Image: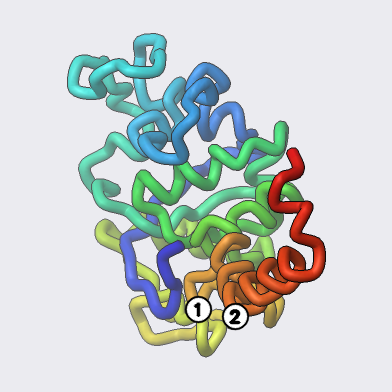
Amino acid sequence: MEKFTVHQGLVAPMDRENVDTDAIIPKQFLKSIRKTGFGPNLFDEWRYLDHGEPGMDPASRKPNPEFVLNLPRYAGASVLLARKNFGCGSSREHAPWALQQYGFRAILAPSFADIFFNNCFKNGVLPILLEGSVIAQLFDEVAAFPGYELTVDLPRQVIVKPDGAELPFDVQPFRKYCLLNGFDDIGLTLRQQDKIKAFEANRLATKPWLAHSL
């Protein structure tokens, strides 16, 4: 998993409440047995005017010119500004995969669905809770200033605005530790690789018949 320390990026506003995971990555794309390739289909039903299916070439699709991520001013955005209850609906882990693979590293919202919130941390995306009034002000500023960027400083737990003002945010210490070090669940387990190998060696030495069991 990619480490998250300090990230500066263009902000894209998703001005909708209750954006569910089926909108983030529609169900037909969950057929894939791979963990990659979901970025082109992020918000597929909103980004395109035609119906998308796995394996379609994005270059052959009909983009929706009115959808926010298709507007030239938000090209390359890596910080998503959202409204309340972002990531609600089913618990598909494909949703943070699609966001991360599109290029988003942080999501700012007044509230998130619990499972989506947890899945973001496990996949290198930082979900940040901010007061509704703060989010509303950020929406106004993004709309007023093209090229609006924010700097997300995870070690200091602050968001730095273009004028230098800082917005503090909370994050659980363990989740912060994992993001700073790029540890997903597998990475955390592999830190104990020597102990695991020692345990397996001892188990086979004391119970050799297990080596031949199904």
Query: Residue 170 is drawn in which quadrant?
Result: bottom right
Percent x, y for residue 68? 37, 38
Q: Nearer the viewer, residue 99 or 19?
A: 99
Whether residue 6 appears in this view of the structure is yes
Q: Quadrant of the N terminus?
A: bottom left
Q: What is the total number of numbered labels drawn onto the structure image?
A: 2
Badge 1: few (under 14), some or many (20 or more) residues near its Cα, within 10 Å? some
Q: Which mark identifies residue 75?
A: none
| Disc number for residue 177 | 2
Answer with left or right where residue 136 lies relative to residue 6: right
Q: Dots 1 and 2: beta carbons under 8 Å?
A: yes
Based on the displayed image, in which of its 4 quarters is residue 120 positioned? bottom right
Q: Residue at x 35, y 10 (%)?
A: 50
Considering only vertical position in the picture, is 44 above or below 115? above
Report the disc number at residue 180: 1
Rendered position, 116 above or below 150: above
Residue closest to the eye, 157 or 162: 157
Q: Amino acid at mark 2?
A: Tyr
Where disc 1 sits, the SS reads helix
Q: Viewed as shown, does residue 114 lie left or right of 166?
A: right
Residue 66, how many percent across, how many down? 34, 28
Q: CA distance from mark 1 to mark 2?
A: 5 Å
Q: Amino acid at mark 1?
A: Leu
